Amino acid sequence: MTSQITRLALCSSVLALAAGTAAAQTAPPGPGTTPSAPAPATVEAGSQTVTAQPGDTPTEDIIVTGFRASLASAINAKRESIGAIDVIKAEDIAKFPDNNLAESIQRVPGVSIGRDAGEGRSITVRGLGAQFTRIRINGMEALSTTTSTDSSGGANRGRGFDFNVFASELFSSITVRKTQSAEIDEGSLGATVDLQTAHPLDYKKTTFAASVQGNYNDLRKAVDPRLAALFTTKLFDDTVGVLVSAAYSRSRKYEDGAGTVGFDTTNTNGGYCAPVGYAPTNPPLSGANGTTATACSTGVARPANTPENVAAYNTVNAGGGTAVHAPRLPRYGRLTHDQKRLGLTGSIQWQPSSHTLLTFDALYSNYHATREENFIEAFSFSRALSNNGKPQTAVRQAEVNGAGDLVYGVFDNVDIRSETRFTDFTTKFQQYTLNGRQDLASWWTLTGAIGYSKSDLEVPIDTTLTIDRPNSQNYSWDYRQDSRHPILNYGFDVTNPANFGFINNTSEIRLSTSSSINTFKNASLQSNMKLLDGLNLKIGGSYKRFEFKSSATGRAVNSLLVPALPAGTTVADLTRVLTGFGQGFKVPSPTPTSWVTPDLDKFVKVFDIFSNTGTFAQNGVENTSARGNIRSVTEDDKAGYGQVEFDGDRLFGFPLRGDIGVRYVQTSQSSNGYQLVGTAPVLVTAKRTYDNWLPSLNLAYSPVNTVIFRLGASQVIARPDLGNLTPGGSITVTGARSVTVGNPNLDPIKAKTLDLAVEWYPTRDSLLSVAYFYKKISTYIQTLQEDLPFNQLGLDPVLLANSTTAPTDIFTSRRPFNTPGGPLKGFEINAQTALPLNFLPEWLNHFGVLANYTHVTSKINYVLTSANGVPILTTTAALVGLSKNAANATAYFDDGKFSIRGSIAYRGGFLVSVPGGNTGNDVNGQSKITTIDANLSYQVNDYLKITMQGLNLTDAAVDQYQGTDRNSPFINTHTGRQIYFGVGVKF
């Protein structure tokens, strides 16, 4: 691993691979690997001298430039690799192909991405999600985390890497390793991804490059800056190289859409209020909250016993309310994102001779963002009688579709809420690495590395404010014409603040803070000995200490306890009117496109809600909601490995290259969390140690010069996600009521893998390959989600003190289990070709096409229900996060001066959770999505380039659903098209 990084520093140049529009399947050969063909000539960004390879028509060196040069170099590197490795290189100095690292990686076969605020945040490789993929920066494992909307994953307190933290201009290459070697760090089932920043000795001479772009979003209609610069030079007779780079960007976006926060069966939370005289009476005549034969609750009369009311009630109560599903919080909403990124890199290299190289790299990133979420919603349907919820609501008209969803309804006594949630967060990432290589003899090389990284996510403000209108009449929803954009009629003017109130025990002020800190300390040493020609032995070891620490606070009193308005203050003094909602999609009339929404600045001015005193004081361990996120994990990983690499005519006289080895790793974990002893929280520590032997084999065989057969086999592990390792838990008693507990004794996820591939290289810059992969996952970790009454969770009822929640109210319980797993298999097809073809006119010799397709299937055993912590019902479904089909295609023209290309990326639908959230949902899922991007550039002269790029040109929406058969809407949002335009200079 380390020697590969140093070998790259000696041998690689800045290549131009526009992976924003291409899936380049390449990588330099690993350390100690002897190429099967002469390496290409030295490459500079944007140009390359390529020697003709077997199968080429030309017989002399050919000078190619730009995008096409990068593809030719990429194919040559893939051809020389042993394992399944894909590489993406910077298109030019300080210019990565896409404006987001994840969006570049999605061009690689088998890779799909997850988005937040319209940007790539995480990756899935061959159906395996972010938690199964390890990321290394400059050769050292690292973890960067940030936060997002709840529907996009929320705060990342796991092992998944958030790529949107970084400016893409800081990096020179990305390597995606799909097969395992003994020398590669363990911990991945999907892939190991290497991110590499630029190095000064890769450049022939002193170089300065800079770019200035404007970033326009057609939904927000704002133009923001994007700046990048790089400077590098050599000193002391070219033995010392120094490089610095910087990137800054701002991005302001709207995210508009509709949602339901899930579908429940209609009997959940007590069901709807039954008409007078109707048996069985609902809610029951218990006297709770003033229920009587004529009243749903105090001051709320039951609907009259009319044929229309009875028919509507019978419709929604089919099967006792278990056969019909209805939205919990039907709503429209706007999210306002404001993101700023600052990134810096520095690199110093010292090469006093060809036998010695030292490289020091530093990387810093500051990602600061604010997000405001504004919703207008019907709140009654997600609350029980104790919270004045659904049992107060009378249904007047109802229509159920064939799938069992209540797609049309007219209701009385509906609580309408206008909600504002504001989140301010910053992720600061820093990493420092020192890599060294020393040739002890012509046959013996030592490489070593030490490194430190820290990712610090701070969320100093996470606040929700509401204003409410209880018991509104004549409210309706209609999902019949368009389930993703329903007609919502609130029955009153939602733009008039006088129609809302700020009401104690109804309205809310939620206050919280949180932080998540991840640190890595890495060290490695490797000995590479050339035993014979074409036979190398690698022996090495590594040590990693990973520390995770999470903290949180919440409001010390119930969020429903809100102060009275000061004398002379009205709701209008706390609000503003949101306008212009629904650009980019047609909001069906008479759904309002403007509404009154709480204004955070005005709340701060009137109530001083961030004073941390009095009713707005916050606490940590004592807070049932915050307690589960006050936890830590310390993990020590010690590994040693031996690996033999060979290269020669060893099978029927044809070249056979390969590596075979074994890695031993011992993992020691110590996790902390809070448990309740009686009613007092007590810090509990859980410790465990386990070890694994991980053998691996990679072969590359060439029976003819233009064909390579590859085989990879290995045993791999992925350690349990951090959120699951806590011995403690948390309880949320207001809003979305939930109980979450951990399991520090989880075993790692284990798998045996097999990869087979055949690759055909008909010309220097053409490739056709087919790969098959199989993973036998022998143990898996699943979070079981169940909706249960609080009094069935085994918790002390005193935890509900000072809240309006009853012991019979439904809570969402989440607990992790080890489950049996199951098989995962699939195939990839990858093709790319560039013209020239000798019979074509010259101007046609600058076109090219790249395309890939991936098909993956899996059968994972999931737990559906449990009793006293023991699984009692299971089902088989696809792996969470796995898209059965994914494809990318790019067409381009590049003559070295003018370049234009267009790309299309398709990701099939996938499951988000099994079982699904709420009651009666087998899955939560996300629908298929297709995005189209384009890139255009013109090289004015040797120093100046004009660029333009368009992302998501069709403004594709993110669509989530519940229920395999019902496909009930969960959330559907879009963020608009993104256009970048600017200039780049290079000297």
Image (cartoon, helix red, strand yellow):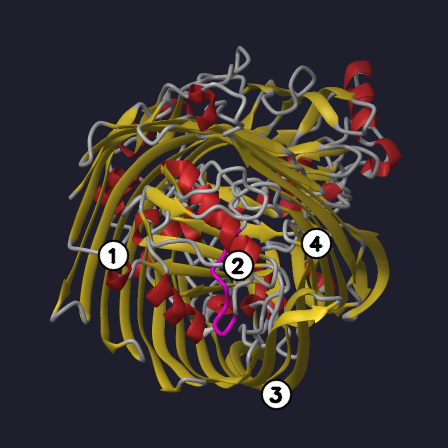
Assess disc 2: are there few (<14), some (14-19) or many (≥20) residues with their C-alpha within 10 Å of its C-alpha: few
The structure residue drawn at horizontal position 40% and vertical position 44%, both measured from the top left corner, is 61
The structure residue drawn at horizontal position 62% and vertical position 60%, both measured from the top left corner, is 190
**Considering the numbered disc 3 on the image, is that residue within a helix, a strand or a loop?**
strand
> In the rendered image of this protein, does residue 889 appear above or below residue 755?
above
Spatial CA span between label 4 and label 1: 35 Å
Spatial CA span between label 2 and label 4: 20 Å
Residue annotated with mark 1: 203
Residue 260 appears in the picture as rendered:
no
Residue type for callout 4: Ala
Discs 3, 1 touching: Cβ within 8 Å: no
Residue in the foreground of this view, choosing between 376 and 636:
636
Q: Magenta residues, as a range?
A: 26-33
Please count the marks in the image.
4
Per the rendering, the mark at residue 37 is 2
Labels 4 and 3: the sequence-earlier one = 3
Residue type for callout 2: Ala
Quarter assignment of residue 549: bottom left
The structure residue drawn at horizontal position 78% and vertical position 15%, both measured from the top left corner, is 308
The structure residue drawn at horizontal position 63% and vertical position 53%, both measured from the top left corner, is 705
Residue annotated with mark 3: 689
Assess disc 3: are there few (<14), some (14-19) or many (≥20) residues with their C-alpha within 10 Å of its C-alpha: few
